[in-house]
Amino acid sequence: MLTVDDARARILADATPLGAETVPLGLARGRVLARDVVARRTQPPQAMSAMDGWALRSVDLAEGHRTFRVNGEARAGEGFGGDVGPGEAVRIFTGAPVPPGADLVVIQEDTRVTGHHDSGAPAAVEITGERADAEAGDNIRPAGIDFQTGAVGLQAGRGLEARAIALAAAMGHPWLPVHRRPRVAILATGDELARPGEPLGPDAIVDAVSPCLTALFADAGADVVDLGIAPDARDRIDAQIAAARGADLLVTIGGASVGDHDLVQAALLAAGAEIDFWKIAMRPGKPLMYGRLSGMPVLGLPGNPVSAYVCSLLFALPLIDRLSGREPRDAASERLPLAAPVAANAMRQHYMRARLLRDGDGAETVLPVRDQDSSLLSALADADALILRRPHAPAAEPGELVDILRLDRLD
């Protein structure tokens, strides 16, 4: 049996980011850039005032001038039409272009108007003593201080959150080149399965795994195609596998082992798939299968809900990340003290569902949930972490440090 790390490495070694498509800014959130994004303009395009105040010449202040003749006004979107000459000042507002001749802005709090025109507009302004030492460049944003035409503002591989989208917009891009979303087909198998809300026979089981994985994969940026539930009949499974062609990833649920009623692997082989492996030294999740069908990766998950969920965190989500153009998420662990004892572990790496507890001082401990049976969804829903128990790990007592994985950092 493969280790978890070896299985992950083999799955990801096969995967490459999908091709590019162009999407409008409004649909770019959560996507990954396929190419560098270069600024189409300079920002700001010219020197701009960073404050409300008065634009004037620093040389006048240096020569001892304190009172200036007001020569006009500059507002954002409507600059002053002339130049600022000796002894002149222009009323200026934040975001307005600095008029030619001026090289500093004195903020309005450091001035007082000393004369008015008949219209009521300021005619003269005095710089107060506190700001007589203002220097060239004060309160001015130079042209191109943010970015300049031709500069790479966003690099290929960058995930697009709101901040990146704002920068792309400012650089003049209404559309962005992004990696295509992976199209993930999900196929559940088993005579016992029924959809949520359907009438249930005495031996039926509600399919909770498909809705779980649909939500999990969609949150990871995939377009999910639900192929439904195939009964344990080869012709039905063959037909559903054929329907998955054209997807970027096929995820099957159940039937991947080699028992009399585990027909998925045989159906895949008959369809021309190459199976890389189908056993992992882990629990829950030993019967995990991976292969390729006509170039499409195929991941066969166990039918038990907890097993399918844990395997999806460790293998399916990193694979979707790689296909989407992102760095695959890493199941990096941290160490916390136990709140209850745990028994010695056997040969398979164990992912125990657990809850994080916080005391009055904010210190965290980790408590295994009441039952580790891989079919118990209530215990999974209560968990917010996994305790990672290495193969042959000895028993551990309360207070001992153990490796944990926070679920909110994985799913």
Image (cartoon, rainbow, N blue to C red):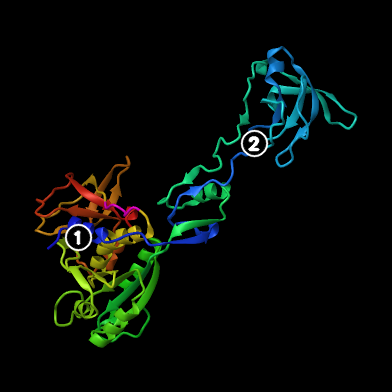
The three-letter code of the residue at mark 1 reads Ala
* Residue 253 x %, y %: 26, 73
Nearer the camera: disc 2 or disc 1 = 2
Residue on which the image places disc 1: 7
Q: Which residues are magenta?
A: 327-331
* Magenta highlight: main SS: loop
Q: For residue 335, which numbered disc appears in the image?
A: none
Magenta span includes 205: no
First in sequence: mark 2 vs mark 1: 1
Image quarter of the C terminus:
bottom left
- Residues under numbered marks 2 and 1 in contact, where contact means CB atoms less than 8 Å apart: no
Residue on which the image places disc 2: 46
Task: Give the quarter of the image for residue 10.
Answer: bottom left
Q: Secondary structure at mark 2?
A: loop
* Residue 81 x %, y %: 78, 35
Image side of residue 55 versus residue 351, left or right: right
Task: Give the quarter of the image for residue 143.
Answer: top right
**Residue at image point 29% right, 77% down:** 188
> Is residue 194 visible from the viewing direction of this image?
no
* Residue 119 x %, y %: 89, 32
Badge 2, how many Cα within 10 Å: few under 14, some, many 20+?
A: some
The three-letter code of the residue at mark 2 reads Gln
Image quarter of the N terminus:
bottom left
Q: Secondary structure at mark 1?
A: helix
> Is residue 20 visible from the viewing direction of this image?
yes
Badge 1, how many Cα within 10 Å: few under 14, some, many 20+?
A: many
Image side of residue 385 versus residue 47, left or right: left
**Residue at image point 34% right, 54% down:** 408
Magenta span includes 328: yes
Residue situated furthest top in the rendering: 64
**Residue at image point 59% right, 41% down:** 42
* Residue 340 drawn above or below residue 187: above
